[in-house]
């Protein structure tokens, strides 16, 4: 017996003396069947691999990449506390991440979440992030993250930090809308 690898669809001469392709039935799949098969396979893989087991079903490539980067120490987790008390787990790059990167990660997280919730509904919910950022600051340890180009580390935001939404107020202390 040789140590040569067996190629799928072929038998080595040592096995049966046959060097022809095996008959493999190729039934064409519809788009829907292919999508369903792919999602089932991805779901099974994410559950089988320990570092990916926390990911939701219907996972995207971006979510898998973020989880792998997190495990390799290339990203950090920031917990965002919403006004209703809900805590969102957001992943951002660990080096050179800015306030703008955090805002983009929050928007991506919410977009994915809303798209999963609105499956099968007629109109998905849209969020005006321009309005959100115009009327709210993100605050870490009581300090508003006002400069979008500032590094998160300048505000003391690191792995497992908590940030909260804080209403923007004008000079008179009234909420800006």
Image (tube, rainbow, N blue to C red):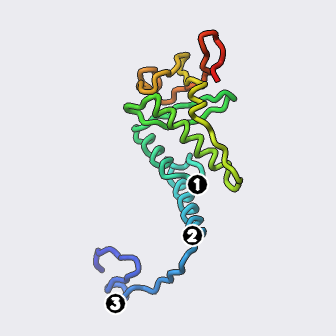
Q: Under tag 1, what secondary structure?
A: loop
Q: What residue does disc 3 label?
A: 17
Where is the N terminus found, in terms of image quarters?
Answer: bottom left
Q: Are marks 2 and 1 in contact (CB under 8 Å)?
A: no
Q: Which residue is mark 1?
A: 58
In the depicted structure, whether residue 48 falls above or below residue 134: below
SS of the residue at dot 2?
helix
Mark 2 and mark 1: Cα distance apart in space: 16 Å
Mark earlier in primary sequence (3, 2): 3
**Image position, residue 157 (x, y; %):** 47, 25
Q: Give the spatial CA distance, label 3 vs label 2.
A: 39 Å
Position of residue 100 measured from the top left corner of the image (x, y, whole percent): 46, 31
Pointer 3 local density, CA inside 10 Å: few below 14, some 14–19, many at least 20? few
Q: Which mark is residue 31?
A: 2
Towards the viewer: 85 or 17: 85
Of circles 1 and 3, the one toward us is: 1
Which residue, as the protein is rendered here, is positioned at the far right? Answer: 121
């Amino acid at each position: 017996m040789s140590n040569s690898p067996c190629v799928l669809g072929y038998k080595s001469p040592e096995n049966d003396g046959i060097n022809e392709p095996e008959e493999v039935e190729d039934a064409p799949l519809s788009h829907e069947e292919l999508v369903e098969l792919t999602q089932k396979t991805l779901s099974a893989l994410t559950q089988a691999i320990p570092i990916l087991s926390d990911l939701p079903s219907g996972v995207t490539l971006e979510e898998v990449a973020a989880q792998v980067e997190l495990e390799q120490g290339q990203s950090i987790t920031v917990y965002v506390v919403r006004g209703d008390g809900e805590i969102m787990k957001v992943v951002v790059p660990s080096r050179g991440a800015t306030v703008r990167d955090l805002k983009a990660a929050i928007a991506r997280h919410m977009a994915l979440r809303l798209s999963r919730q609105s499956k099968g509904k007629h109109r998905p919910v849209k969020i005006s992030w321009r309005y959100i950022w115009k009327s709210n600051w993100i605050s870490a340890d009581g300090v508003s993250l006002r400069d979008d180009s500032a590094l998160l580390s300048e505000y003391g935001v690191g792995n497992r930090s908590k940030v909260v939404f804080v209403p923007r107020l004008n000079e008179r202390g009234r909420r800006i809308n």
